[in-house]
Amino acid sequence: MLQIKNLEASIEEKQILKGINLEIKRGEVHAIMGPNGSGKSTLASVLAGKEDYEVTNGSVLFEGKELLELAPEDRAAEGLFLAFQYPVEIPGVSNINFLKTAINSIREYKGMQPIPAKEFLAKVKEKKELVELQSTLTNRSVNEGFSGGEKKRNEIFQMAMLNPKLAILDETDSGLDIDALRIVANGVNKLKTKDNAVLLITHYQRLLDYIVPDFVHVLYQGRIIKTGGKELALELEEKGYDWIQETEVSA
Amino acid sequence: MELTQTTIVAKPLPFADFVLPESKQGQNFLNLSFPTTRNEYWKYTRLGKLKTAKLKISQTSNITVETINNIVAIDRYQLVVFENGFLRNDLSDLTGIEENNTLSNKLSNEYFTALSDASFTSGINLKVKANTVLTKPLLLVNSSSDPESISNINHNITTQQGSEAMVCMLDLAAAEGSGFLNSVTRINAESSSNLEIVNLQVLGKATAIQNIYVDVAEDASFKHFGFSLIGQLTRNNINVNLNKTGAYAELNGVYVPSGSQHIDNHTYIDHIAPNCNSSELYRGILSNTATGVFNGKVMVRQAAQKTNAFQANNNILLSDKATMNSKPELEIYADDVKCSHGSTTGQMDKDALFYLQARGIKKTAAVKLLVTAFADDVVSRVSDEHLAELINAMIEKQISEN
């Protein structure tokens, strides 16, 4: 589904990603872990198409298409979803209007008619329950005045509404208490099918207790320096990132 | 008022070849000089093109009900239409309204007010009777259809004690050329009355200058909305006196200049009496090489204790070449008051834009969504939801086309 080859990217002339190679197949859950400043969020932003970053080398194929040549909205329409680390507050735009516009833009991209109002509302009702989002929140302005937990739940609610092929969850666990973490993780697990894939970006192992990855990658100084199964996360939690750095240097 | 060649005064207008009637208003006008950017009041608005324009009095009748109906559905209103400064009797319903042909006693030192006071050709006198509600809101159209016309209009509106009225003023230029619409509106909101004015400006290539003078009495409320959608050169001056305790004034506006358009809003709220509230919210969305001006002055007199005055002006520049000049002013002589003002001018919020795009919304649609939301903070204050919806659609259309 996703093939990242030798991806290099920089911001304001400072190179952050120094040659990422990663392949994600449908049905898989991947986790990228790494210390602060290793390039985790940069990778998420580059994949979603944030223009602050300049891709200096490499390629990203998503379902056979060169992702890096697509506008951010077209990447979303192709089935890529980024759950933001810091969801943006948008005063004056209601959550409902926002979602309807998003769904219909994606439908238009695919040459489909706008979603019928009844079908849309039924979908909102169903998906809202998935992340236990309060009814009043859907009618309020996007993320405005939401608590940290509500913002993250709203991200997963949007993911459920848009039904992406690949969801990138950028530190979705940060700022969540244990109950909110469980709700968010449950939501993601329920949305998981054999046809879609998830890329978790996280600093801590605890999210991986709830969403179990097939592969764990360690990102360090802009490169993936180690890949393993879910047990790698536990080992990291126990021994810290220094352990990886040392083993890599000695290897 | 009729203008004829026989009522000659000494000096002709710089921009029109008609003459003023012999009157103390005419004499007053002739003592004033044409404003330049050296005047602080006109610092950011250049009138050079107006000064050199060759304009004339024109009685052309081109406007049709359809033209108006295409903008505001007229069936909900009592329609009164002025075209190039003259009343269109055939299109107007004058129930309860008189045509204004009396010179004002006031001698203004503001150039364009003095001009209109000395030479206006028509206008309305509307008196909303005490303790009544204007059943059908008034749709007052001030239009220019002759590219070479100058029109001077003077309106007087009084809401008597305890009455209530809504007036929609539509300023419209139907011709491609550069007509000049000059108008003066004097408003008297008597005690405990409520008046709301919604002004839509769709002015094409015309030059429009309007001066509004408002006196608000005890416990009366005056709300004004100015939506300047299109206008090559638009200048709105609103001057409000809060004369008695409990008087309230709310001035709001959205301006959306594009191309090389220039829209200038000057407001002046004078807190004369104690216990009065005022609120101002103006938002601008500027594209291409458009320029905007907001100058909002709030005066709080020594006697005006317990004043509550709020003012905000926020602007989004959609282009690197658009310019906004924003100047909030507070002058306070009382010590027990609550006054705040703020002005912001910036680009579109890039993070918000990316967030919307990352959900599949095209950049142009995302811009539209954000800008409409920005304007809606003002539009949603219009009490007539039907009209608010229409204004939102007009703003959205204006943004989409630029």
Image: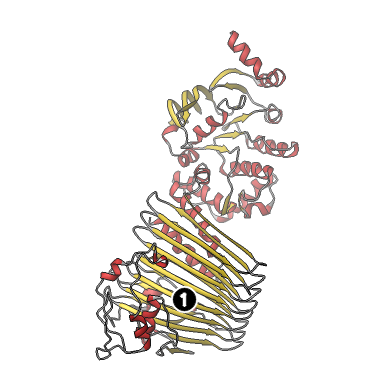
Q: Nearer the viewer, residue B28 or B194?
A: B28
Residue at the right extreme?
A179
Instruction: Report the side of B51 relative to A84 (left or right).
Output: left
Which residue in the structure is indicated by mark 1? B212
| Residue B135, above or below A128 | below
Q: Residues within 10 Å of mark 1 (few under 14, many from 20)?
A: some
Q: Nearer the viewer, residue B375 or A179?
A: B375
Q: Quadrant of residue A205?
A: top right
Question: What is the quadrant of the C terminus of chain A in the image?
Answer: top right
Residue A74 location in percent, x, y? 45, 40
Q: From this viewpoint, is residue A119 visible? A: no
| Amino acid tagged 1 | Ile
| Chain containing mark 1 | B
Local SS, label 1: strand
| Residue A54, above or below B40 | above
Q: Quadrant of residue A157?
A: top right
Residue drawn at point x = 48 percent, y = 72 percent = B238
Q: Quadrant of residue B47?
A: bottom left
Residue B11 location in percent, x, y? 27, 81
